Amino acid sequence: MLDRNRILKDPEAAARAFRARQTEIDLEGLLDLDGRWFEANREWERLRERRNALSSEIGKKKRAGEPTEELYAEVLRINEAIEASDTLRRELDRQREERWLLLPNIPDASVPVGQDENENVEIRRVGTPPSFSFAPRPHWEVGAGLGILDFDRAARMSGARFSILLGAGARLERALISFMLDCHTGPREGESAYRELSVPYMVLPESLLATGQLPKFREELFHMPADDLFLIPTAEVPVTNYYRGEILDEADLPVKFSAYTACFRREAGAAGKDTRGLIRQHQFDKVELVWLSTPESSMENLERLTRDATTILERLGLPYRVISLCTGDLGFSSAKTYDVEVWLPSQGRYREISSCSNFMDFQARRAQIRYRRTADRKVQLVHTLNGSALAVGRTLAAILENFQTEDGSVLVPEALHPYMGGLTRISPERASPHP
């Protein structure tokens, strides 16, 4: 949520920021609604003050033996007016809160201005895409040929956009998860390691409201109405909410968490997009990084977080690039985002495998995550950051494509050898009906 005082102080600057995001916001209507609520609230308080004054006057008259019937009648009239005024102010408050929650974050000044993904800015490329003496196959064909990836039986069980990994495929997925977590939580040169969390996969609406998925992206979520619980779309939600409503000490910052979870997304509006393969699934695995930072350090920490995400790709030997999202392609809650894209030979292009964002105080204001400054003991909001390091299914897809061989087998990246029980090459295998 945005700082209301910031918007009220300079609504034109806010309007320019929303236009840069290519977002239509009726800011004038929102400010008018805010003004109406303010007036209704002031009238409600005025009526209550009048009732209190009358009650005091009635007490004095009763002690003096004077009649109080007219005063009692006025109190009854004021009570009715208070009830009507309270109903109005509550309704106006509901409407304005709803609209404030739909305001996106304001882009940082360093974000490139642009209309859409075509105006994102490439920051760097690392690694050279492999060359093949044959036409590289898409990962779903590679996986099916190896007998380690099954979409047909997954669809029979659960419908479209699900998959099953078998044998060495399941082992590779597990290896990637362990490798990523070990990289982030193990010894690190010059800075602290991430602290690993194991978190619930179901959360209350308040948790999704805090991180910005609600109310804006409700249609993207899997909801269980009987319990009013949602399956998490990303570990960002439970991990960021770990300190919701709490005050930390500045000495404890930055907080750095890493968590592996399954993630669940309805992919509403994704009809026709990535209908084959592991790129866009209803259920997928991800290792997430979350930072809580002081405001002064958050942009520097975004660079560090992005570096941690890309380190995984470098150790796996996967070519990638980093791009800075322009204002028109920025996510709802983000003030600045770097997308990390991995090379997929079958598509001849880079595809997103991680999104590293600085939300500044946008999520912290919703979640009321604050810290007490050492110098003056004042309490203020932290800045939150997060990034995937990495999306496991997409990493697996990139390995199948970049390390495929002409005979249909796949070389296992050297960094994963200790996690694969000595397996250095995945060769075709056949799933037995009686394992």
Image (cartoon, grey):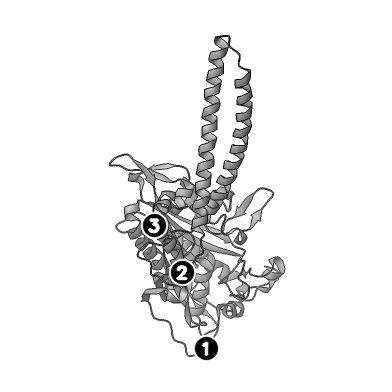
Please name which of the two marks, 1 or 2, marks the residue nearer to the observer: 2
Asked whether the residues under the numbered discs 1 and 3 touch, taking CB atoms below 8 Å apart as contact, a structural biologist would say no
The residue located at (51%, 42%) in the rendering is 39
Split into 4 quadrants, where in the image is the C terminus?
bottom right
Picture coordinates of residue 343, whole percent (x, y) = 46, 77
Residue 135 lies, in percent from the top left, at: 52, 88
Label 2, label 3: how many angstroms apart (C-alpha)? 37 Å
Q: Taking 435 as reference, is 98 left or right?
A: left
Q: Work out whether residue 398 or residue 117 is closer to the camera in this orientation and state it.
A: 117
Residue designated by label 3: 186
Q: Neighbour class for label 1 at 10 Å: few (<14), some, many (≥20)?
A: few
* Residue at the spot of label 1: 135
Q: Amino acid at mark 1?
A: Ala
Q: Identify which residue is drawn at 61% across, 73% down.
A: 149
Mark 2 residue crowding within 10 angstroms, few (<14) / some (14–19) / many (20+): many
User: Are there few (<14), some (14-19), or many (20+) residues within 10 Å of tag 3?
Assistant: few
The residue to which callout 2 is attached is: 328
Mark 2: amino acid: Gly
Horizontal side of residue 236 vs 68, given as left or right: left
Reading the chain from its start, which is encountered first: label 2 or label 3?
A: 3
Q: Position of residue 350 (x, y in %)?
A: 46, 77
* Residue 198 in view of the camera: no
Question: Disc 1 versus disc 3: distance between alpha carbons?
Answer: 39 Å
Labels 1 and 3: the sequence-earlier one: 1
Kindly indicate the quadrant of the structure image that contains residue 416.
Answer: bottom left
Closer-to-camera residue (300/165) = 300
- Which of the 4 image quarters holds residue 285? bottom right
